[in-house]
Image (cartoon, rainbow, N blue to C red):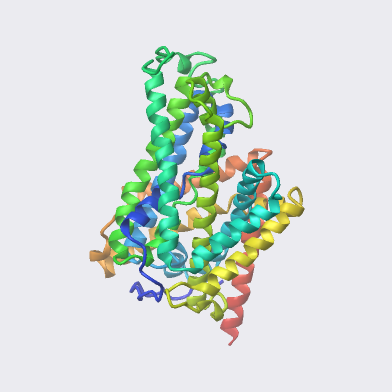
Amino acid sequence: MHDAPPAPLATEAEPLSHGLKQRHLTMLGLGGVIGAGLFVGSGAGIALAGPGIVLSYLIAGALAMLVMRMLGEMSSAMPASGSFSVHAERALGRWAGFSVGWLYWFLLVVVLAAEATAAAAIAHGWAPAVPQWGWVLVFMVVFTAANLAAVKNFGEFEFWFAALKVGAIVLFLALGTLAVFGLLPDTDPVGLTRLTGEGGFLPNGWSGVISGVLAVVFAFGGLEVVTIAAAETDDPARAVGRAVRSAVVRILFFYVGSMAVIVTVMPWTAQKAGLSPYVSVLDSIGVPSAGRIMEIVVFVALLSALNANLYGASRMVFSLAERGEAPKGLLKVGLGGVPRRAVLASVVFGFVSVLLNLKWPESVFLYMLNSVGAVLLFVWALIAVSQLRLRRRLEREAPASLTLRMWGFPWLTWVALAAMAAVLGLMLTDDTARPQVLWSGGATAGVLLVSAVRELRERRR
């Protein structure tokens, strides 16, 4: 692949609606990353690291914060609906924008199917008369309609979904803290005994902490949608800066704070496989119907993620079409400033993925999930490389646009890249994670090959 000349840094006006408000973007940043991976999947990390899971979340969260700071710097200076795909093209050439854009789109539509199926399984348990595929159909139709309408509808959906999730975590932190100090009825102060007993703070040593990082790092995926959505606000540069500043710190507080409460209130060995650690803690302090309450919260979290992923996928493929990297027919924008064909293109593949998930969950769909398992790390790596290239250009050509700057540039950017390489290397040594790296690497190589063929054809022309 040849290096294309650097793309101009000037940002063109987006033809999309500017219907998102600052409150929508801020809550999207807070709630977009809080999902089933935290409420349910964190139990796997606790089993690996014990109380050291707090350190695992600190390490993974710090990496996510660095990535978001880099992305915030570029997006506040050059807001665009394609976000990091546009930045990669400007920094590295068309091949980079094409590759990262299509990989991220594929990631979103596959994960969307998994979320729709998981939410349908919960709803089927509540209403067994409706088959699981029927619930999937209902969810897909409802959220397709919401995304085809004005963008403010998406913003309102996400605002209230995120508000419920954030409220649930704040309430959990409050109840857990009261339980630690014995301030709830029928509870005694626990102090730090849970952290030092049952093998100590690091029962499985630092290898357990690192294994915990591998188990939880992907739970931070989803923050990137904030920078995609910023292009549809009245003041994108200011909006994305404020959203990134507030989101990264609060998310880290919610995640690390939750884990600290969980391993302080209950022995880490008391966590039951397959059961949300949040449910275990609420049960232990006497909260009635804790299981049903958290089931509702997880259900809302899944639908929220489904909604956000459909939005992000449609805007990413629309941006690719704007730059000639996807069919031009996807550029059709409705009266409300919504890229309806891009929404439909994304949801069609979503429906196909759901059908594959329902019919062949252990074969075809499992391969699809593995093929996007490590894509988030590839996306983050390109964000970091793009920031290294663009920061210098921005300082020369548009220094006034750098309203949000990456900390410790360029050293912390290099630290983040080294951490991503280390995570990928550790995944290759892990029997359960290795297939994800290999399949994701294959998917990435396939997209890069398509990009190389396209550029070769253009050169011949």
The residue sitting at the bottom extreme is 461
Please tell me which residue lies in front, 255 or 379: 255
In x, y percent, where is residue 144? Answer: 55, 64
Please tell me which residue lies in front, 326 or 436: 326
Q: Can you tell which quarter of the image residue 84 is in?
A: bottom left
Please tell me which residue lies in front, 37 or 409: 37
In x, y percent, where is residue 237? Answer: 30, 63
In x, y percent, where is residue 115? Answer: 60, 50
Taking the image as shown, residue 360 lies to the left or right of residue 285, namely right
Residue at (55%, 48%) from the top-left corner? Answer: 302
Q: Can you tell which quarter of the image residue 255 is in?
A: top left
Q: For the image shown, how many numbered marks are present on the structure?
A: 0
Taking the image as shown, residue 131 lies to the left or right of residue 239, namely right
- Residue 203 in sight in this render: yes
Residue at (50%, 79%) from the top-left corner? Answer: 332
The correct choice, above or below, for 138 with respect to 456 in the image is: above
Quarter holding the C terminus is: bottom right
In x, y percent, where is residue 268? Answer: 54, 22
Residue at (54%, 60%) from the top-left corner? Answer: 143
The residue sitting at the left extreme is 400
Quarter holding the N terminus is: bottom right
- Residue 257 in sight in this render: no
The correct choice, above or below, for 353 with respect to 204 in the image is: below
Residue at (50%, 22%) from the top-left corner? Answer: 202
